[in-house]
Image (cartoon, rainbow, N blue to C red):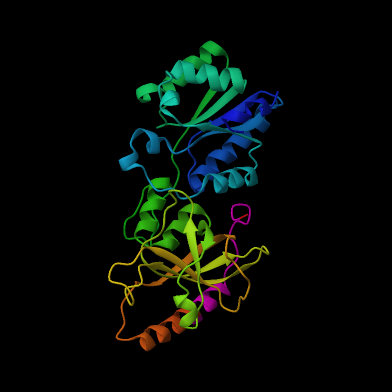
């Protein structure tokens, strides 16, 4: 529930995990698994609850440095539910919320709203005004107010095929991988392919004129777009089916000196009308960089090869975790 829906909070006490949980990567999944185990072990009729934030705190506190999001808030909520979280409290992040002291935050949200019995928190998590609250703060408050606190470590290991490396699974590492176009490294950390969610908008129909019609996908607010290039992927059409998707992320240098950044998706063999529809577009493999060819005929020939590769790669595709790919 969001701020306007606090009347929907369960009457049962809560076991709570707190965080942004952007992307719901494998580290997040481990934390949520520990949360569910904790609820079961305590056997106190508590409800597994996540407290999260929208917009991303950095979007309010440091907008010039705020990260692009791996997932939209709707994708995040769907994923949390699919992983077994029974209740999600979405706090609208604002300067007012950021101004609460750690004690005010805990009392208002955890104690009064959620009737907290236990909190699961990352060792490096900070909360409250000026990030003054940490694990020690929360443990001291728990001892005083009657709830337990468990700190969890970071999880993960480097992806061997990556050019950047990361010591743990983290949203920052996933963003870095996608920024380099390393969608397979991102998939390793996410436990599933990265999926851009967006609405299909009208374009200039240039792809159709070349024999390869495309759906121009406008991603959600502040959602990350991978490095420019051509990707083999999959897209879920309105009928719920996953289909092969040849994806172009770029500015179309063949036709424009400085064109707008577009995500164009070609679905081989699909003839349905997608305008205005919402698509999830999963990135499986980066085939090549964006480039300008000697002529349009060379471009069309290369597109044909890209589509053939995409179809071959898609034949091996199964949503690795259908719970998180809806």
Residue at position x 48%, y 74% in the image: 205
Q: Work out which quarter of the rendered image holds the C terminus and state it.
A: bottom right
Q: How many marks?
A: 0
Q: Which residues are magenta?
A: 308-325
Dominant SS type (magenta): loop
Quarter location, residue 146: top right
Q: Is residue 198 left or right of residue 326?
A: left
Residue 132: tell me if it is visible. Answer: no
Instruction: Decide: is 228 above or below 291.
Output: above
Q: Is residue 175 left or right of residue 143?
A: left
Residue at position x 61%, y 32% in the image: 49
The spot of residue 31 in percent (x, y) is: 53, 39
Q: Is residue 323 magenta?
A: yes
- Single out the residue that lies furthest toward the top: 144
Instruction: Decide: is 57 above or below 275.
Output: above
Quarter location, residue 127: top left
The spot of residue 110 in percent (x, y) is: 56, 22
| Observer-nearest of 115 and 252 | 252
| Observer-nearest of 236 and 252 | 252
Residue at position x 48%, y 38% in the image: 20
The spot of residue 310 in percent (x, y) is: 50, 76
- Single out the residue that lies furthest toward the left: 257
Instruction: Decide: is 246 above or below 302.
Output: above
The spot of residue 304 in percent (x, y) is: 46, 84
Residue 280: tell me if it is visible. Answer: yes
Q: Work out which quarter of the rendered image holds the N terminus and state it.
A: top right
Instruction: Decide: is 105 above or below 310.
Output: above
């Amino acid at each position: 529930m969001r701020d306007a829906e606090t009347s929907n909070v369960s009457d049962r006490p809560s076991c709570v995990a707190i965080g942004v949980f952007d992307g719901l990567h494998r580290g997040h999944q481990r934390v949520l698994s520990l949360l569910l185990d904790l609820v079961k072990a305590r056997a106190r009729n508590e409800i597994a609850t996540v407290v999260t934030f929208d917009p991303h705190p950095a979007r309010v506190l440091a907008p010039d440095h705020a990260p692009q999001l791996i997932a939209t808030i709707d994708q995040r909520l769907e994923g949390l539910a699919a992983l077994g979280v029974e209740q999600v409290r979405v706090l609208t992040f604002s300067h007012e919320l950021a101004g609460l002291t750690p004690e005010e935050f805990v009392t208002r949200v955890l104690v009064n709203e959620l009737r907290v019995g236990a909190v699961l928190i990352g060792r490096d998590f900070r909360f409250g005004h000026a990030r003054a609250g940490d694990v020690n703060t929360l443990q001291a408050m728990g001892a005083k107010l009657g709830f337990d606190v468990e700190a969890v470590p970071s999880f993960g290991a480097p992806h061997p095929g990556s050019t950047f490396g990361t010591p743990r699974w983290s949203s920052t590492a996933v963003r870095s991988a996608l920024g380099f176009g390393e969608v397979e490294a991102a998939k390793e950390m996410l436990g599933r392919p990265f999926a851009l969610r967006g609405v299909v908008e009208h374009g200039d129909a240039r792809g159709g004129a070349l024999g390869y019609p495309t759906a121009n996908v406008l991603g959600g607010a502040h959602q990350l777009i991978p490095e420019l290039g051509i990707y083999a992927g999959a897209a879920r059409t309105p009928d719920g089916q996953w289909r092969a998707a040849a994806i172009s992320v770029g500015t179309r240098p063949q036709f424009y000196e400085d064109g707008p950044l577009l995500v164009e998706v070609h679905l081989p063999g699909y003839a349905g009308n997608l305008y205005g529809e919402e698509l999830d577009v999963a990135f499986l493999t980066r085939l090549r960089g964006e480039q300008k060819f000697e002529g349009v005929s060379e471009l069309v020939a290369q597109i044909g090869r890209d589509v053939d590769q995409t179809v071959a790669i898609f034949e091996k595709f199964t949503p690795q975790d259908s719970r998180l790919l809806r």
